[in-house]
Image (cartoon, rainbow, N blue to C red):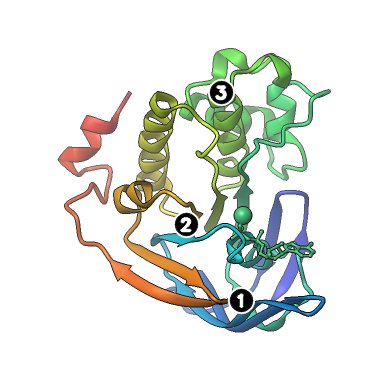
Amino acid sequence: ATRILELNDTRAEVVGTSADQAPVARITGLGKTFGEREVLTDIDLEIERGEFVALLGRSGSGKSTLLRALAGLDGDHTGTLTVDGAVAVAFQEPRLVPWKRVLANITLGLRHPQPRRAARVALEEVGLVERADAWPLTLSGGEAQRASLARALVREPDLLLLDEPFSALDALTRITIHNLVQQLWIRHRPGVLLVTHDVDEALLLADRTLVLGDGRIAHETRIDLPRPRHRDHPGFLALRR
Ligand code: ADP
Ligand code: MG
């Protein structure tokens, strides 16, 4: 497929043509070194459309490095990366621009015929529309994280990259946001790569869990739990606000 990569602060867009059933992301032989230090060695990974993949691994094992490479935020690696569609990223810290109101943070860099309207819809989805005119510094941690998710989702990504976005949240807020992410995933069906160090979170959310160790994918588990797959699934109603 032709690959034209456009980079923006939270978005790397690839315009190309390929078969519908092609994976949304394909990594082949990815390697990355920082100076002398080899952080990633010959990583192969495919993420299917609508597949939810969790990536576990010790701190420093290279999870964020892998995610940054997939996001197109770091071109300096070996191997090939193909992403077929739009990418959005949410990080551990919400990274909202403090001098822009919440809504303006969502529309920042957004190419859409009706950006403000789309942003309000995204804020509604994350239950934050009443905070659209608030300043980011007045948001609680959970609210800021929801705003960050809205900013990622408004881009309607084919691939959603989440780098430990829930780890700074208190337990109750985390449960709320887990449910929210599950609902949004069911509704939009992006491929997801979730970096986490929380095994329970991986079991709860992901179809497939990978463990990164010694620069390689050291372990892979497929989990087949009866979790809601589609908005028509009865379990989906239970997740609704
Ligand atoms: P993880 O997200 O799994 O905790 P990272 O991908 O952030 O790990 O980092 C993997 C390794 O690469 C760590 O040893 C880290 O110190 C190193 N590293 C990450 N980014 C840089 C950088 N910009 N320069 C030098 N070393 C880096
Ligand atoms: Mg990290």
Question: How far is disc 1 from disc 3 in space, using C-alphas?
Answer: 33 Å
Q: Quadrant of the C terminus?
A: top left
Q: Residues within 10 Å of mark 1 (few under 14, many from 20)?
A: many
The residue located at (22%, 49%) in the rendering is: 227
Q: Is residue 220 above or below residue 112?
A: below
Image-based side of 70 in relation to 213, left or right: right
| Pointer 2 or 3: first along the chain | 3
Image-based side of 166 in relation to 118, left or right: left
Quadrant of the image where one finds ligand 2: bottom right
Whether residue 1 is visible, yes or no, is no
Callout 2 touching callout 3 (CB < 8 Å)? no
The three-letter amino acid code for the residue at tag 2 is Val
Q: Residues within 10 Å of mark 3 (few under 14, many from 20)?
A: many
Question: How far is disc 2 from disc 1 in space, using C-alphas?
Answer: 15 Å
The three-letter amino acid code for the residue at tag 3 is Glu
Whether residue 168 is visible, yes or no, is yes
Callout 1 touching callout 3 (CB < 8 Å)? no
Q: Nearer the viewer, mark 1 or mark 3?
A: 3
Question: How far is disc 2 from disc 3 in space, using C-alphas?
Answer: 21 Å
Element at label 3: helix
Q: Is residue 113 above or below residue 223?
A: above
The three-letter amino acid code for the residue at tag 1 is Thr
Residue at mark 2: 192
Ligand 2 lies under 8 Å from the Cβ of mark 2: no
Element at label 1: strand
The residue located at (65%, 38%) in the rendering is: 93
Residue at mark 3: 143
| Pointer 1 or 3: first along the chain | 1
Q: Nearer the viewer, residue 173 or 232?
A: 173
Residue at mark 1: 82
